[in-house]
Amino acid sequence: MPPATPPSEGWNSKPLGRVAAPLREQVGALLREAIADLRLVPGQRLVERELVDQLGVSRTTVREVLRELTAEGLVSVVPNRGAVVTAPSLEDARDLYDVRASLESLIVERFCARAARSQVLRLGAAVDGFAESVAERQDIRSVLVTKDRIYEVLVEGAGSAALRQIADGIQARVRMLRATSMSADGRADASVDELRAIAAAIEAKDAVAAASLYRDHIQAASVTALRNLKQSLSPDPPTTTTTPTTTTTPTTDVRRTR
Amino acid sequence: MPPATPPSEGWNSKPLGRVAAPLREQVGALLREAIADLRLVPGQRLVERELVDQLGVSRTTVREVLRELTAEGLVSVVPNRGAVVTAPSLEDARDLYDVRASLESLIVERFCARAARSQVLRLGAAVDGFAESVAERQDIRSVLVTKDRIYEVLVEGAGSAALRQIADGIQARVRMLRATSMSADGRADASVDELRAIAAAIEAKDAVAAASLYRDHIQAASVTALRNLKQSLSPDPPTTTTTPTTTTTPTTDVRRTR
DNA sequence: CTCGTATGATCGTCTGACAATCGGTTGGTG
DNA sequence: CACCAACCGATTGTCAGACGATCATACGAG
């Protein structure tokens, strides 16, 4: 696996205005986001001191956030060595997808059982939005955003705080893998068809079918994601890590004005 | 729901020798355990200062542990008000059990597929041990310990770090509910039969049947647990909270000798 | 060339401090 | 006597600085 020490700067860019919310939540959100879309690559070390400098918060805060992320499985800590962005092994990735399949198909069931009419409509709209962004061949990131929207609507309609919290955790961990999966040839188009079928099943109030289809959907995503992941793990020479350029840090300061 | 402020002391008793491990892990383990077996009751406030005094560690450490527990869903924080032991609503509990059913039946499948012969044997032994402790009408706590042993063997045999981490999280959250479920009349005996059947299915390498049986098993546990929980939530007069006696703090000092 | 040690980078933990905020208490007022 | 407002205490959120422990690595001795 890649120790990946080089890209330790340049991932931080968003100004992020001073909100009146617990500072550590902002920091947490920032890091989660950065990990999700690979501005912080798996295996990269997260040195407390550097984070302190780059984020403009105290070590106390950084460390607390790091604990949260650790519990969420987004970062792993080597005792006395510090935190690194979790680099899921092939097996881990497989398990993650399996868990996600179980969990989210459960969410789909709940959605069928509890979602209001308006939410079903919103689901349809979300699927359309996804189909559109795929059809337009937009860049991967924005495609993923529309995909997230679908997930969002589903979780919303399932109407369960506990379920949401757990599913969000898994989702966060899978997100970094998704980027590779969705960019595979034809996968996005296939996704659209599958999601259309799922939406139809939900529309027809067929919870069992919907859940089953959803499971298959994730299974399919899993296959291509794992294929890509395997590919990007074995050959070391063709560097798969992104942004090795050591740009100067923008020094985004999250601290609110006092 | 019970604000439950009274029992803020007297839950800490274990001497817990000075191990050479990250302090916060010891503290974390201690608190998790205390929450699991209701020495810290749901709804109870966890005031930083008090924890500092009772555990003999600095606020830094306490706060970091609190963040971990929060991410694990064992405690909830009200901004500016502090942490309280999470008191799952009825819906939360139901969801938790559903998730657990999905997740652990997945673990059972994995166990069937990957467990070594020796692990299957260990599973049988664990089930026997559970049956025995139930037959002997031992107190609930030790019954739960043998039950945990079964879970432990299953997770072990499934051989997946990622799966384990996620399942452990759910398990921890359900643990506090389990105590009420297992103490219900006849539930323990029924459990034994169900687990025997599951073990048999696993022995026969019938992954599908085993997973399905396990799902049913948890479903059954869920039903009685929820029934009891509902009962203990609605009637406020018969105080269900444990140890309202404000005993003097034993002041267990976790700090290692320096 | 190998091995033990010096050195540096980081983490783990502690202490003390201070502002911000929430909840309840107190005291004034109609 | 009821009600509202200002006040005060308890607690959290965040920061700064310090120091020992530990691991990795570079370096010099043998």
Image (cartoon, coloured by chain):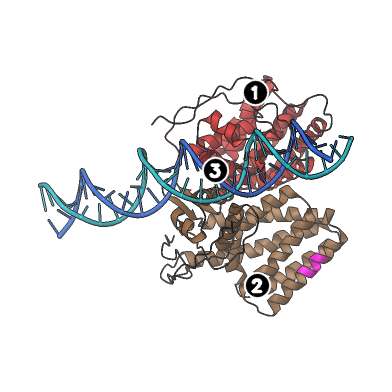
Chain colours: A red, B brown, C cyan, D blue
Q: Is residue A205 visible?
A: no
Q: Earlier in the sequence, mark 1 or mark 3?
A: 3
Residue type highlighted by circle 3: Glu
Q: Tell me if B116 is positioned left or right of B137 in this view.
A: right
Quarter of the rendering containing residue A37: top right
- Residue B124 lies in the magenta-colored region: yes
Q: Extreme bottom residue here?
A: B136
> On the rendered image, what quadrant is the C terminus of chain B found in?
bottom right
In the rendered image, residues at marks 1 and 3 fall on the same chain: yes
Amino acid type at circle 1 is Ser
Magenta-highlighted residues:
B122-126
Q: Nearer the viewer, mark 1 or mark 3?
A: 3
**Which residue is denoted by mark 2 in the rendering?**
B142
Which of the labelled discs sits on residue A155, or is there none?
none
Front-most of residues A250 and A106: A250
Q: State which chain disc 1 sits on.
A: A
Estimate the x, y position of residue A157 in percent, counting from the top left.
Answer: 56, 42
- Residue type, mark 2 in image: Ser
Image location (x, y in percent) of residue B236: 42, 67
The reply to whether label 2 and label 3 mark residues of one chain is no
- Residue located at (58% from left, 34% from top): A49
For residue B203, side relative to residue C16 (left or right): right
Q: Which quadrant, please, contains the N terminus of chain B?
A: bottom left
According to the image, label 3 marks what residue? A64
Mark 2 residue element: helix
Residue, disc 1: A133
Q: Is residue A204 magenta?
A: no
